[in-house]
Image (tube, coloured by chain):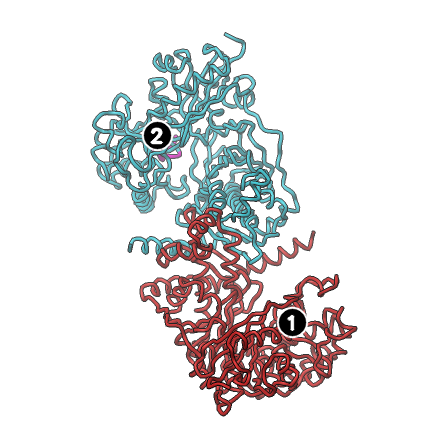
Chain colours: A red, B cyan
Amino acid sequence: MGEHKYAIGVDFGTESGRAVLVDVATGEEVATAVHLYADGVIDEALPGTDIQLPPDFALQNPADYIEVLRVTIPAMLKEGKVDPGDVIGVGTDFTACTMMPIDGRGTPLCMKPGWRDNPYAWVKIWKHHAAQPEANRLNEIAEERGEEWLSRYGGKISSEWLFPKIWETLNKAPEVYEAADRYIEGADWIVLQLTGQERRNSCTAGYKAIWHKQEGYPGDDFFAALDPRLRNVVDKKLSRDIYPLGQRAGGLTQEMAEMTGLRPGTAVPIGNVDAHVSVPAATVVEPGRLVAIMGTSICHMVLGTEEKVVEGMCGVVEDGIIPGYFGFEAGQSCVGDHFAWFVDNCVPAEYHEEAKAQRLDVHQLLEQKAAQQKPGEHGLVALDWWNGNRSILVDVDLTGLLVGATLASKPEDIYRALIEATAYGTRVIIEAFEKNGVAVNEIVACGGLPERNKLLMQIYADVTGREIRVAATAQAGAFGSAMFAAVAAGKEAGGHDSILEAAKQMARLKDVVYRPNPAHNAVYDQLYTEYLKLHDYFGRGQNDVMKRLKALRQQVLAGD
Amino acid sequence: MGEHKYAIGVDFGTESGRAVLVDVATGEEVATAVHLYADGVIDEALPGTDIQLPPDFALQNPADYIEVLRVTIPAMLKEGKVDPGDVIGVGTDFTACTMMPIDGRGTPLCMKPGWRDNPYAWVKIWKHHAAQPEANRLNEIAEERGEEWLSRYGGKISSEWLFPKIWETLNKAPEVYEAADRYIEGADWIVLQLTGQERRNSCTAGYKAIWHKQEGYPGDDFFAALDPRLRNVVDKKLSRDIYPLGQRAGGLTQEMAEMTGLRPGTAVPIGNVDAHVSVPAATVVEPGRLVAIMGTSICHMVLGTEEKVVEGMCGVVEDGIIPGYFGFEAGQSCVGDHFAWFVDNCVPAEYHEEAKAQRLDVHQLLEQKAAQQKPGEHGLVALDWWNGNRSILVDVDLTGLLVGATLASKPEDIYRALIEATAYGTRVIIEAFEKNGVAVNEIVACGGLPERNKLLMQIYADVTGREIRVAATAQAGAFGSAMFAAVAAGKEAGGHDSILEAAKQMARLKDVVYRPNPAHNAVYDQLYTEYLKLHDYFGRGQNDVMKRLKALRQQVLAGD
């Protein structure tokens, strides 16, 4: 055994699992590994069959999760030349709500003979959208009944969350609902596999399953109002035992130790969610600094000392991000996806040629051209609602808008306007937090976008008027899981006593700081005023043209 | 000499002159010819010099006009094997307001030694936009004084028209204004060259120079209010002798006969404007049928028996299109230009490849893809203001808007939405005419677009709820000039007694009729309602975001 102690973090994503092996004293990333899921996202037919899935389905195969552990951990031990005895903990995080029905022994129904051919027996992942009718009905009933918990979720429960997904199965495949001993999040299932212990985490329970530390779940009569068969769904199909983040869930089982090459009993923390676990990885363990996880979409995470109602937030959960704090989450549905759409659909051939000649990708070329402009120069403002609006309007039926185009407008003008629109969207969220007493003094970014687009980062600083720093790790999810693993192991084993201590020792920021340029900020204040006026006009019912166009489109397509 | 009699029409356009030789009895186009102007549009430096032009300048060289006559007429006589003795008339039409300073003998100042190096001595063509400050001031003063003629021009005199252009010269180059014996439209100058007679036409005087058949020009005190030096501008620099369309201006001079190969004395009609002369060429010589000249922009022409004030029209002029009627003109600033902008800036590389593989141009490919959709299917609405709005809002500072975009929006969706937006714009104009008692029962189209885009024509029929027919001639301007030439020659010479008679004998429609599809029309009624709501919100002062963005852009650029 060596002087150095290590922790492993494994991040279970949408297409793959990503793992990192970290020195717990220094935060140095000694080794990393990625393993693609063999079955990927299952959205057409069940693996190895021609059983077609209904529209809006998105499933995974839980066997792929086990495979990630079996492949990545030994590979990292080898690459890092680390003695398994020096690995003091292995932590995990997951997409959420990613849920599955299991039997009494924790085996997913889809892995059992007799159930493999039933789509509802598989893992429904976060972006499974087939439970929208159930979500709509749930929201109607909750509003009619004046359920107070609704305000903790910005007034709407998403179809991506737990109860709509369970209800969908009850409606469409009651035999699966009946056969399920219980439902469990992937985040908790993987911990059950590693430790043999079911230790449901406060993060997914709070953000995805309407659980509250003091009040627990909604009452049984609420579930009965949805469907009499759901009256006892919590007691029959879930559990009221919820564990705060930062605790030890258990030790690695003999079987898992053999499979991974780690020692039996290696500490495993309570499970966590990819976005939430990134917060301490971005050095944030206190109120006042907002973590923006910037990729295809943006998750905004900030801590507070009191429970507040913030318009359009995704949720507020005590111990939901960092134990001892209220964790607030908000989100934008369309950020990286927005620029990808633009590059795929709106960039002329000559730009592709120019990019090729300069050995840039098209995003880089557009960034380079757009960076030559001053704020306000292109004369455009957009509403960044190409994929609806999550925070703060919570309305999937809103759509995109661009105003100000002329015959002189160039692709880089529109590209820059789309970046700015997403920055205005982030500012709306920040102002909603601050208006309701949740301070946001500074931003720390992580995820793919900050690595790739400096212009975007500068625009966010200029628009929000706040300094932006960037997490040092490129794998904030897996890194945060390794931090929680070091905490689960504890100081005596060479780890840390708390996630605050782990953040101090392990988490780092890059040297770069994006500072708001006061002159740019002044112009963006004017443009933001225009954005807000359009935001309220089109988003708050003064002109519901976006919804009417969507409804007309549905009607026309249905007439086919 | 043969049995058949012929007339020649010559259309002086922006980049070239186009000529046609027509059988006056049948309307058969016996020969056509095009001649590009050697100096084209002069907007960078004066020809053969390095004298740079100020911004927004657009000039032409009058020598190029003469060259068109010298080249095209003999070429057509040869191609058509026509005896010059059988050519009974030669008519002309011009872009307008395209104006120049001339000396006492009709020679343009720019053709005289000592003046060639002065940009203000050259021909300012219609799209010369450097007189915007003068136009703005003129409109302010006219409004302050309550000048009643302003309502005949939709409430605004354009910077493209005669008096702003003259005033600009007075302000910037008073020596040119002083040296000019008078100012003349290209339409009248070419007739002066052909016949030796100055016969100013009622069309350019009415539409571009604020002249009225009963009231004449604005009073001298109005011009004095602009600038004391302009008090006698009409008497000193123009003329009050205005001739109605359809009359004979004179006979071809000996010199011109020698140059063109035609007989001296060949009848030449009063000059005309390209758009207006197209109306009888499209068979329209009576109220109720609107002629849409559809190219980079659209001119809308319709006849009436009474003078009416129509919101946002470009002008109403007695005898301005067809003698005996009031000619109403309206316009859209951005139609073909809109689609060209889209194809140049917004169509991805793969579409270019697909078009190439199918041997289509990109417009055709987009049309083909867009034609597979039903109205309302793409979920988009646009405001077609990429180049401002002429009718009915008369506001150059309005800009484009697109609403309804999602991550599923494709280029053909946006392309179709832009076509539809221009059709909604045409419907707004038609409804403004009808609301004010000017009937529009049917549409006749001419120009380049109807030849090229069947989907567009069908959408216009579906959106407006009106049948659309298409002029048979592809050269409506030149063809209309040949018709007026046949009228100037008169029945005794083998021509026609009136333009009505000429239209009956010579003008033809194509067989195709675009008929509104009632189901499509019903969907477009809904979409048009959305368009109108946005039109009024952004165009009538409820939210002047477009103007503020333009102003901010100017301010930012000026700060460079």
| B209 is within the stretch colored magenta | yes
Q: Is residue B485 above or below residue A321?
A: above
| A317 is within the stretch colored magenta | no
For residue A374, which numbered disc appears in the image? none
> B228 or A386: nearer the eye?
A386
Q: Chain of mark 1?
A: A
Q: Is residue B239 above or below residue A91?
A: above
**Residue, disc 2:** B39
Inspect the image, locate mark 2, and give the three-letter code of the amino acid beneath it: Asp
Please report the bounds of the magenta region as a residue range.
B207-217
Q: Position of residue B174 (x, y in %)?
A: 21, 35
Residue A546 seen: yes
Q: Is residue A47 above or below residue B99?
A: below
Q: Position of residue B386 (x, y in %)?
A: 45, 47
**Residue, disc 1:** A64
Q: Position of residue B554 (x, y in %)?
A: 33, 53
Q: Chain of mark 2?
A: B
**What residue is at 34 percent from the left and 63 percent from the top?**
A520
- Tag 1: Cα neighbours inside 10 Å, few (<14), some, or many (≥20)? some
User: Which residue is at the far top?
Assistant: B1
> A86 or A524: nearer the eye?
A86
Q: Position of residue B427 (x, y in %)?
A: 53, 44
Q: CA distance from mark 1 to mark 2?
A: 71 Å
- Tag 2: Cα neighbours inside 10 Å, few (<14), some, or many (≥20)? some
Magenta highlight: main SS: loop
Inspect the image, locate mark 1, and give the three-letter code of the amino acid beneath it: Asp
Q: Is residue B183 left or right of residue B478?
A: left
SS at circle 1? helix
| Badge nearest the viewer, 1 or 2 | 1
What is the count of numbered marks? Answer: 2
Which corner quadrant of the image does residue A99 belong to? bottom right
Q: Is residue B349 left or right of residue A129?
A: left
